Image: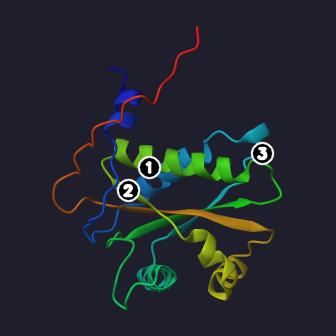
Amino acid sequence: MNETVNLMITRRSVRKFKSDMIPKEIIDEIITAGTYAASGRNSQSPIIIAVTNKELRDKISKINAEIMGKPDGFDPFYNAPVMLIVLADKSVPTYLYDGSLVMGNLMLAAHGLGIGSCWIHRAKEFFEREEGKDLLKSLGIEGDYEGIGNCALGYVDGNYPTEHPRKENRVFYVD
């Protein structure tokens, strides 16, 4: 089987990470893959915020849990030490699709490099709040960006998740 197709078939969402930090070189390689995602009219509108600072990561996690309605101490990022947050420029008609493709590339690249990943939602809600707007401002990011997703990255703690059977009747050929 083709190596790329095999990565697509074997990637799983990881929901239990070790706290060990991923080397910067590996994070950078995953980010590079994200920047090569397809985008409508090659707009390349999505941006990636790499969060490796534990204090900031924990703050974002706490707000994410609050948005979910979870109790204090719940970690929706499953202890992942790295968060790659994808945002996209809402003025681009394909921004949501473009940002989703970036998320897919990040997760596939991570899997190919032996790093677990999971798409965590609520990036949109986080960046609608003052804390999210303040983070963008502190990074010098201007424009009308929407949070697309949080890509949790880390080493898998325990066994790699097993696959779920594929549902039938999802492909239709028209000859």
Residue 64: x and y, percent?
49, 79
Numbered disc 2: secondary structure: strand
Q: Quarter of the image for the N terminus: give it.
A: top left
Pointer 1 with pointer 2, Cβ within 8 A:
yes
Q: Earlier in the sequence, mark 1 or mark 2?
A: 1
Residue at x-position 44% and y-position 57%: 27
- Does 49 sit above or below residue 100? below
Mark 2 / mark 3, whichever is N-terminal: 3
Checking the image for residue 43, the label placed there is 3
Provide the residue designation for mark 1: 107
Name the amino acid, label 1. Answer: Met
Q: Amino acid at mark 3?
A: Ser
Give the x, y percent position of residue 58. Answer: 42, 83
Q: Residue furthest left?
A: 158
**Extreme front residue here?**
169
Left or right: 111 in relation to 172: left
Q: CA distance from mark 1 to mark 2?
A: 6 Å
Q: Residue at x 38, y 56 (%)?
A: 117
Instruction: Estimate the x, y position of residue 97 in percent, counting from the top left.
Output: 66, 47
- Report the Cα–Cα distance between label 1 and label 3: 21 Å
Position above or below: 64 against 18: below
Quarter of the figure with residue 61? bottom left
**Secondary structure under the numbered disc 3 in the rendered image:** loop
Left or right placement of residue 163 versus residue 126 in this view: left
The residue that label 2 is drawn on is 117
Q: Residues within 10 Å of mark 2 (few under 14, many from 20)?
A: many
Q: Tell me: 27 left or right of 116.
A: right
Residue lying furthest bottom: 72
For the residue pair 44 and 96, the one nearer the viewer reads as: 96
Judged from the image, the secondary structure of the residue bearing numbered disc 1 is helix
